[in-house]
Amino acid sequence: MDETVKTLIEVSKPLLGVLVGYFLNAYRLRWRERKVESNVRALLRLEVDENLANLRYYKSGVDVRSAGAPYQDDVLPGQMPLANSLSGVRLPEWNHQSYKSLLSSIPNALNPEEIIKIYRFHAQLDELGLIQERKHGAWLKEVNEGAAKLLNDGNPLEGRT
């Protein structure tokens, strides 16, 4: 009986070593995945914050130049201060570098709702630029309202790390 126990112990040692190694490796991999997820979230948050800061700067420049002028659809050039202020202030260049370069990592770092929010945020920034380039119809109101909505909504990734 003692020989059987000794044999079982001797056979179990390598198996136990393999199991311990497997679990340590799994723990290390999960720790690394979480670190990558956290880093992706941080980079995206920084990029969104930078774009929002640029949008605030743009909006403050428009607000200062327009001095509270009212909105009016189908404005003729030079007819009102807001039209002049929006025409003279170009939207900033939006930063999409982190969003584009981390696109393959985003599904692992964000939940489905956050993926939709971050996509819409970047799409809305691009839409503001397209509206300003078109300059027809109620574009003044659309740009100003779009900018206000983005600023009001804030960073879609705030609150969760």
Image (cartoon, rainbow, N blue to C red):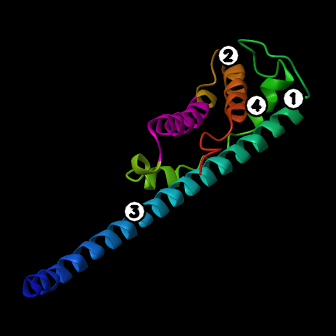
Residue 15 is tagged as: none
Residue 86 is tagged as: 4
Location of residue 22 (image quadrant) = bottom left
Q: Residues within 10 Å of mark 2 (few under 14, many from 20)?
A: some
Give the Cα distance between marks 2 and 4.
12 Å
Amino acid at circle 2: Ala
In the picture of the structure, the residue carrying the numbered disc 3 is 30
- Numbered range of the magenta stretch: 110-130
Residue at the spot 68% in from the left edge and 27% down from the top edge? 143
Residue extending farthest front: 1
Circles 2 and 4: CB distance less than 8 Å? Answer: no
Tag 3, which secondary structure?
Answer: helix
Q: Position of residue 57 (x, y in %)?
A: 78, 44
Tag 1, which secondary structure?
Answer: helix
Amino acid at circle 3: Arg
Q: Residues within 10 Å of mark 1 (few under 14, many from 20)?
A: some
Residue 66 is tagged as: 1
Q: Position of residue 139 (x, y in %)?
A: 66, 21
